Image (cartoon, rainbow, N blue to C red):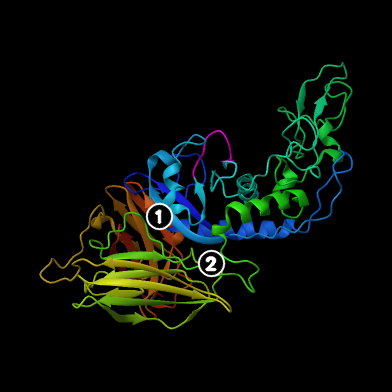
Amino acid sequence: MKVNVHFFVNDDGTGLTAGNGASNQLEQRDVFQKADDLVYFANQYMEDISSNKQLNQIPWGADTTSAQCVGLRFLLDEVFIHRDSNMDLINIGGHNDQYVGINYRDAYNILAVDIRRASGYAPRQGRYMVVRSFDQQLIVHEFGHSLLLEHTHFGNSNGDDNCFDTPWYKWEYDRYGDGSVIDSKKTCWNVSNRDASGTDLCTPNGTTVINPHPCCDSSTVNNNVMTYSAAAQSGSIAALTPCQVDIAMTELLKEKCDLIAAIEPICKPVSAHIGYKPNTDFSQDCSWTFYLRGSTNETEHRISYQKLQPDGTYSPFLDSDWLPGRAREERVVVGDDPYIKHGTVRLPSNSTYIMTLTTRNNCDTDHYRVEFTTGACDVGDQDDSPNPGPFHTEEFQAYPNPSNGPITLEYGIASSAEIEIYVGSNATNSFELIADISGYKLAGSYHHQLDLSFLPNGAGTIVVVVDGYPFYKQFVKQ
């Protein structure tokens, strides 16, 4: 089934996703891989739970059933980064409609934000969920609500979730043996069963614990995906029952069949995707990155460019061979500016292109296209140095140089900026992104120690790309 994953940044397109939240912030360049990971691990979870049986049906009077295959997997369709500060922190049910309406109804939508009041939310029979973590069980649990599955612990007796094969229980805890109930619930988390002070409630001590907590009994372990428990989080333990799967698949085929990408495919269907940061301006920027990691299940891929001709037709401009493995990214530079060197492909200025990513495996092929027009990035009569923007060129240092070990990089920026740092060998003309020190940076001075052990001896280059503008520092490794 096709799914979209949505991320949100500041209104001006800068910063981390969920930037004002308390957790799960991401660099913008990382969201495409995160979306791919989210789908992969959710699919693995559904595969794993297909071998597991619902626990404790007999003790709680539920119908006895065997392990139930979960015949559903996700296919990543699109990845979006939206400019919307209001989505950093939202209340359940608020401010969502514009991201799940008519423009996004071709797939189920997963909105990744720092939601208030809950870990996740999905309206019953809806076509979207809002989540604040990328936990695989949370994704499948919330999707269950969209397919009419209720919490197994709701109601007052078996059957209130419309399934008589899901255990339902309620416990009361008389901790001190005096007949007073200090706690009662319908769920057991079953992790440590300790109170706030750390006292073990499973081991009576004759004073502060007279009776063991009900959740210490193995009969209260509920491994159902649609309840709240530690057992439900593990794919090696969690389960859905036959009744639940029947309800879910009936709803999918009845109300959401337009979201289905394939039924009983010989191998996994592929998807192609081209993503880019929301502040990318093709008509102004002289370099940018297309992120291709939102593509899924491909064993090989190719990238082609067509150029618009004066007669209004497009003709082939560049074509790659079929490249083995997953699609990763395409770094585009525009024009003949010699200061912009680091790129996968160089395109002429003031031209319109269609870039096409084609992905395939043994039994499926998919395409994704982006049309864009480049700006005036030729040097011409321009100054022979790049626009420094917020970059403090006087602070740009790399030492010791020459170096027979690590090298220290120093630079400063006058205002916040997106930073990418590459290190490469001049001999091989290949560069590696140093991901752990790249990303969105606030104004200030930065010092990093770079490990050069992966480079051959000889001349090399450090490239610091500041909001799309590259700055270079030569060095020698001995």
Residue 146 % position (x, y)? 60, 46
Left or right: 394, with 269 as reference point: left
Instruction: Say whether residue 321 is magenta.
Output: no
Q: Nearer the viewer, residue 90 or 368?
A: 368
Q: Which residues are magenta?
A: 113-120
Q: What amino acid is at disc 2? A: Thr
Residue drawn at (83%, 47%), measured in percent from left and top? 55
> What crowding class fits label 1: few (fewer than 14 Cα within 10 Å), some (14-19), or many (20 or more)?
many
Whether residue 304 can be seen here = yes
Residue 131 % position (x, y)? 55, 44
User: In which quadrant of the rendered view does residue 350 lie?
Assistant: bottom left
Instruction: Say whether residue 117 is magenta.
Output: yes
Residue drawn at (70%, 49%), measured in percent from left and top? 247
The secondary structure type at the circle numbered 2 is loop
Q: CA distance from mark 2 to mark 1?
A: 25 Å
Reading the image, the residue beneath label 1 is 439
Left or right: 426, with 296 as reference point: left
Quarter holding the N terminus is bottom right
Q: What amino acid is at disc 1? A: Gly
* Number of numbered callouts drawn: 2
Residue 88 % position (x, y)? 44, 40
The secondary structure type at the circle numbered 1 is strand
